Amino acid sequence: MKEGNPSKRRTSILKFFRELPAQDDDGQVLPISGLWNTAMAHPNDPEFITLGIFECMTALIWKGLKNRLWLSHDQNIYIPYYAAHIIGSYTMNMEEFAERAVHAGVIPPLVELLRGRLTWVEQRVAVRALGHLATYSSTFPAVASHGEVLELAIQLASSSLEIVYSHFYQFVDRRISYHCDLLTRGMGGVEMESRKAEEWASQLQCWSLQLINCFAFKPEFLFDICKPEFLVKLPAMWGGLVNENSPAGIGLLRTICQHKLGRGPVANCPGVIEALCNIARSSDDWQYMAIDCLLWLLEDQSTSNKVIDKAAPALTDLAEISALGDHKRLGDTIVNVLQERCQAQGTARNYISSRTKEQIDELLSSRQRIKWEKNMPKEDLQIKQAAALVVKLEGNSLFSSGDISGAASKYSEALALCPRKSKKERLVLYSNRAQCYLLLQQPLAAISDATRALCLHNPPNRHAKSLWRRAQAYDMLGLVKESLLDAILFINECSQSNDPDLSLRHNKVPDYAERLVKKQMRAAWLFREAAIKHGGVPTEDGSGDVYGPEADDSEWETASESDVENGGREADDDEENDDIRKDMYDKSTTKDLVRGYNILLTEDDT
C-alpha cells in the first residue's frame, strides 16, 4: 500500500488478491481487516475493484464455508465476515462496482451465508451486501435468479430479533468470543456487547426489509411478499431508538401500497390499517409514509370501502398539517382525497358509515368557513375572536373548579366561534380540550385533539403540552412506541422552552416524564418479545437480562405539566410563552432526541 511506484503497487496488490485465498499462513485476518477499514473509508475508490478484490473475497467466503478446519485455525473465523462486509461496502454506492461484483460470482456464497451456514453475524453482512446488489436495475436480476433469496429475507426479517437474543444476548457466559470482538472491537465489556447486539439485531432486521423492499417494487413478487402472516408483523418492525435511519416495516408497506396488487392484501388486514392510522397520528420520523399508504388505499376504488371507516378519522385529524418533510400542502391533499371518496357515486358510497360521513362533512364545512371568513369584515372577525376568548376563559374557570366535562363543552363552543385563520388560538383550544378528555378517561378523543393541535403548530409535531397529553393518551391505550416518541419529543421541547411551566429546572428531566419514558423504553425494548418467549425480561436499567417478573416502578400521574408545577389543575390560558426555537428541529432525528434525553438526566440516573 505504501509503494510509491504506481506500476509496482498495482502489480503487488494484484498478486496479493490472487494468492491470498490459497494461502494457509497465520495472520491472514490482519490484512483483510485492513481492507475492511479501507472499504469503509473509501467505498467509491475503484483501485481494488479493478485489481480483483471481489474475486478474492468470494474465494475466501467459499473457503470458510467448505474448509471448517481452516476456518477454525488461528483467527480465520473472522475472515468470512470481513469478506462479505467488504463486498457490501464497495457495492453500496456504485452500480459499476456492483456489476463487477456479480461478474466475480459474489452472489452464491453470500446466499449461503444468508441461509445461516455460519452464524447470525455473517447473515447480517450477507443480507446487507445482497440488499445493495438488489438496489440496481442491472444487478437485481442476478440476485432474484436465486429464488430462495426473497423467502430467506422474509424469514430473517421475522425471526432476526429472536435469533440474536437466543443465540447471543440471553446467556452472557455462552457468547462466542469472536462475536464479542466484532461487536465491540475489543473496546467494551458485557454491557457494551449487549448494547451493540441490540443495534446489530435491528440492522439485521432492517437490512432484511431493505432487501425485500427491492423485490416489492416488482409486481411479480408481491404475491410472495403479501402473505397476511407477514404483513401483520410489518408495523411493529421499526428501527427503534438504535437504528432510526431505517424506515423498516412502514417503508416496506409504503412500497407495497404503491401498486394495486399490494393494496388489496394490505386492505384485507384490519390490524395493519389500524397500525397505519396510529403511525400517521404520531411523531414518528416516518409519519408521512403511513399517510401516503392511507391516501393510496383511499384513492383505489377496490380498497377504499374496506379502509375508509378506519382511515378517515385519522386523516381528518391531520387535515390542517401544512407540510411534512418534502410533502407540501399535505393537508389540502388529505381534504381532496376525502372529499372525492365522500362524493363518490353508486354503491361505493354505501360503504361509508354515517359517523365517517359526518366527520368528512364537518371537515368540508370547516374548509368552507375559510372562504366565508375571507369575505367577512375585519371587525366581525375580531368580534368572533373576542367571543371565543370569553368562552375559553369560562372553560378555564370550569376546569380550575373541577368541572372537566363543562370545560370541554366550553372549549368546543369556543372552537366553533374562533376564526379558522386564528391558528394559535385554536391550537390552545384543542390542546386544552385534549387535557379534559384525558381526565375524563377518553384517550381516543384526547389523541384526536392533541394531533389537531400539533398539526396547527409551526413546525408540526413540536407543541410540548400537546405532545405530553398525547403521550399519556397513547399510554392509556397501550400504544408503547407512539407514547415513547411523544414523551421524548416533549422532553426535548422542554429543554428549549422559555415557558417557566415547561423549562427544565437545573437541567433535570421532570420525574413524571422520566417515569413514563423509562416505562415505555422497557416496554418497547427490541428483545422484549423474544425475552418473554425464552423466559427472560429486561432489567430495570435495560442493560441486562434477568429471569422472573419485571420490576415495576411505572406508576405515574395522568397530569398536565401545569399540575406538577402548580400543584393543581390548570388549563392553558395563553400560549405566548410557548414559542420554541423552531430552527432547532428542522433536521432532528429520534437519535438526536434520545441523545438529548440522556444528556438531561443526572449522572446517577444515566
Image (cartoon, rainbow, N blue to C red):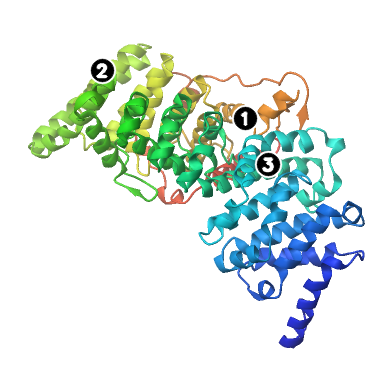
Earlier residue among tags 3 and 1: 3
* Towards the viewer: 239 or 494: 239
Q: Position of residue 539 (x, y in %)?
A: 73, 28
From the viewer's side, name the closer residue of 213 and 32.
213
- Mark 1 lies on residue: 518
Q: Which residue is mark 2?
A: 354
- Does residue 5 lie above or below 154 as drawn? below
Residue 473, above or below 164: above
Q: Residues within 10 Å of mark 2 (few under 14, many from 20)?
A: few
Q: Earlier in the sequence, mark 1 or mark 2?
A: 2
* Element type at mark 3: helix
Query: Could you tell me how far apart the alpha carbons at marks 1 and 2 are, in whole angstroms?
Result: 41 Å
Q: Tag 1: Cα neighbours inside 10 Å, few (<14), some, or many (≥20)?
A: some
Quarter in which the N terminus is drawn: bottom right
Q: Could you tell me the amino acid type at mark 1?
A: Lys
Residue at coordinates 38% horizontally, 23% vertically from top-left? 434
- Of labels 3 and 2, earlier in sequence is 3
Q: Determine which residue is flagged by label 3.
A: 201
Q: Position of residue 147 (x, y in %)?
A: 61, 47
Q: Secondary structure at mark 1?
A: helix
CA–CA distance between discs 3 and 1?
21 Å
Q: Position of residue 484 (x, y in %)?
A: 54, 32
Q: Residue at x 92, y 64 (%)?
A: 26
